[in-house]
Image (tube, rainbow, N blue to C red):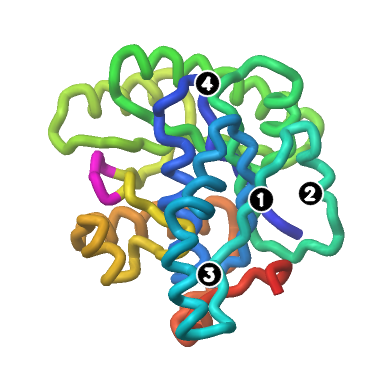
Amino acid sequence: MSKVISFATQKGGSGKSTLALVLAAPLATEYGLRIAVLDCDYQQSIVKTREQVDAANFAKLREANPDAQYPYDVYPWQLSRIFDFIDNPEHTYDLIIIDVPGRADGDDVFNALTACDAVIVPLVSDYLDRASTAEFMTILEAIKKAADDAQIDFQYYGLPTKRVAGQREEKEMDEYIDGLGLSRFNSYLGHRKAYTRASTLYSLLNPAWARYAGGTKDTSDEIRRVCEELIERLGLPDRRATAATSVSTVSSSAK
């Protein structure tokens, strides 16, 4: 059965869509997960990245290899139809990622969050972001308590993003979240230009694409730590040996 997660927050500009882009490709290509991304955000950033940024490179790939595929599937989707996708018995994805709109109001957002096994919240250390993010995570804590009472598995985690090493605000953010008793990842993503150049076609763990995007070994190390913590926390399969022998990973529904 698929695990379902969302990258969510109630404040725009926190990088939730970027986070989905940064992680989905390496989880598919390096760790061998069959992944679907449901782009439910009004801006459709992930869909646009595939259609407007990656399409030309994909066409070139197809010229050289007609069997080439994107590493994971992307669907423009309506929040109101989340369960139509999740409950479809024909899907054999390991992981379904939902990119929800940057708000916490409305039954559609609430229903999408409760459909998830885990919600990942970008943690940005800016003071104004901090209070808004903590408020959103408190809502998730209430959902978790209700889920626990109903014996339904639901988790949420803060994931530090745009982190700048040594800044006082970063330490204060960690202390603030920990002081509220909220959950967060031990790993993090730094404030790196390469993450704004994430692709739905190429992983930033691909050395050639990483160089093009301005990535470094530190970039790769960060991404691997986050991917492996996510896999461990959600109990996802790790198929690195299988993925390493494949030229590209094809989702079972993409054939």
Residue 60 point in image, percent of width and height: 44, 74
Q: Nearer the viewer, mark 3 or mark 2?
A: 2
Q: How many marks?
A: 4
Residue 142 in the image: above or below residue 204 = above
Decide: few, some or many residues near mark 1? Use Cα within 10 Å; few <14, some 14-19, many ≥20: some
Q: Nearer the viewer, mark 3 or mark 1?
A: 1
Three-letter amino acid code at disc 4? Answer: Gln
How much space separates mark 2 and mark 1, taking CA atoms?
Answer: 10 Å
Q: Is residue 210 left or right of residue 30?
A: left
Q: Magenta residues, as a range?
A: 190-194
Q: Does the magenta segment cover residue 191?
A: yes
Mark-to-mark CA distance, 3 and 2: 24 Å
The reply to whether residue 241 is in sight is no
Closer to the observer: label 4 or label 3? Answer: 4
Q: CA distance from mark 2 to mark 4?
A: 24 Å
Question: x and y percent of residue 167 in the render?
Answer: 15, 28
> Which one is in front in this view, the residue at disc 4 or the one at disc 1?
1
Please provide percent x and percent y for residue 208. Answer: 27, 71
**Residue depicted at x 41% and y 35%:** 15
Mark-to-mark CA distance, 4 and 3: 31 Å
Specify the amino acid type for callout 3: Asp
Q: Which residue has dot 4 on it?
A: 10
Residue where numbered disc 3 is placed: 238
- Where does label 1 land, which residue? 75
* Mark linked to residue 191: none
Indicate yes or no whether the magenta region holds residue 227.
no
Dot 3 or dot 1: first in sequence order is 1
Judged left or right of residue 34, residue 223 is left
Question: What numbered label is drawn on residue 85?
Answer: 2
Q: Amino acid at mark 1?
A: Tyr
Q: Which residue shows up at 40% across the image and 29% down it?
A: 14
Location of the C terminus by quadrant is: bottom right
